[in-house]
Image: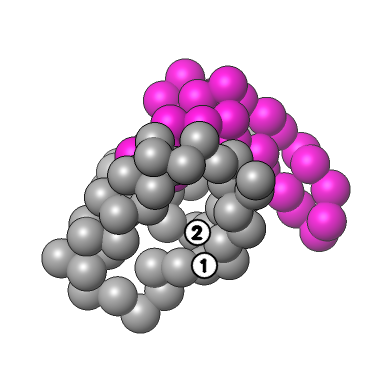
C-alpha cells in the first residue's frame, strides 16, 4: 500500500499542519503504508524522517537517506527553512 500525497499542507495554519503531520504519522505506523510525499514543507519532511529526493525540472538532482543528514544541493533549502542565510 502506498499513500500518494501532493502538497497536503499548503494553506494550513501552523496548528493544522501539526495536526495533519501527527495524523499522517499515526496512519503510517498503523497501516505500514509507504508514502510518496510531494511538498515544499520541509518541517513535514522532517517529521516523517524518510528518504528525501530533490527534484529539479523533473530530474532527481540529489538524494539523502534522511533530511537531517542532507547536504550539498539540499543546504540552501534547509538553511532557508531554518531562517539562516544561505
Residue 30 versus residue 22 in the image, above or below: above
* Image quadrant in which you'd find residue 15: bottom left
Start-end of magenta stretch: 45-72
Q: Is residue 65 magenta?
A: yes
Residue 27, image x and y in percent? 39, 48
Residue occupying image coordinates x 59% and y 54%: 3
Residue 20, image x and y in percent? 30, 61
* Image quadrant in which you'd find residue 64: top right
Nearest to the eye among marks 2 and 1: give it. 1
Front residue of 28 and 68? 28
Residue 3 versus residue 45 in the image, above or below: below
Residue occupying image coordinates x 70% and y 33%: 62
As helix, strand or loop, the secondary structure at mark 1 comes to loop
**Of marks 2 and 1, which one's residue comes earlier in the chain?**
1
Cβ–Cβ below 8 Å for labels 2 and 1? yes
Q: Residue furthest bottom?
A: 11
* Image quadrant in which you'd find residue 60: top right
Query: Where does label 1 land, which residue?
Result: 7
Q: What numbered label is drawn on residue 40? A: 2
Residue 54, image x and y in percent? 66, 43
As helix, strand or loop, the secondary structure at mark 2 comes to loop
Q: CA distance from mark 2 to mark 1?
A: 7 Å
Residue 25, image x and y in percent? 35, 44
Residue occupying image coordinates x 46% and y 68%: 8
Residue 1 versus residue 20 in the image, above or below: above
Q: Quadrant of the C terminus?
A: top left
Amino acid at each position: 500500500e502506498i499513500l500518494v500525497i501532493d502538497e497536503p499542507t499548503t494553506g494550513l495554519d501552523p496548528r493544522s499542519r501539526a495536526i495533519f503531520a501527527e495524523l499522517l504519522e499515526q496512519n503510517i505506523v498503523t497501516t505500514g503504508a509507504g508514502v510518496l510525499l510531494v511538498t515544499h514543507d520541509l518541517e513535514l519532511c522532517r517529521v516523517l524522517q524518510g528518504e528525501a529526493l530533490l527534484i529539479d525540472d523533473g530530474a532527481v538532482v540529489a538524494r539523502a537517506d534522511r533530511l537531517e543528514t542532507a547536504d550539498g544541493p539540499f543546504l540552501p533549502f534547509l538553511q532557508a527553512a531554518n531562517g539562516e542565510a544561505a
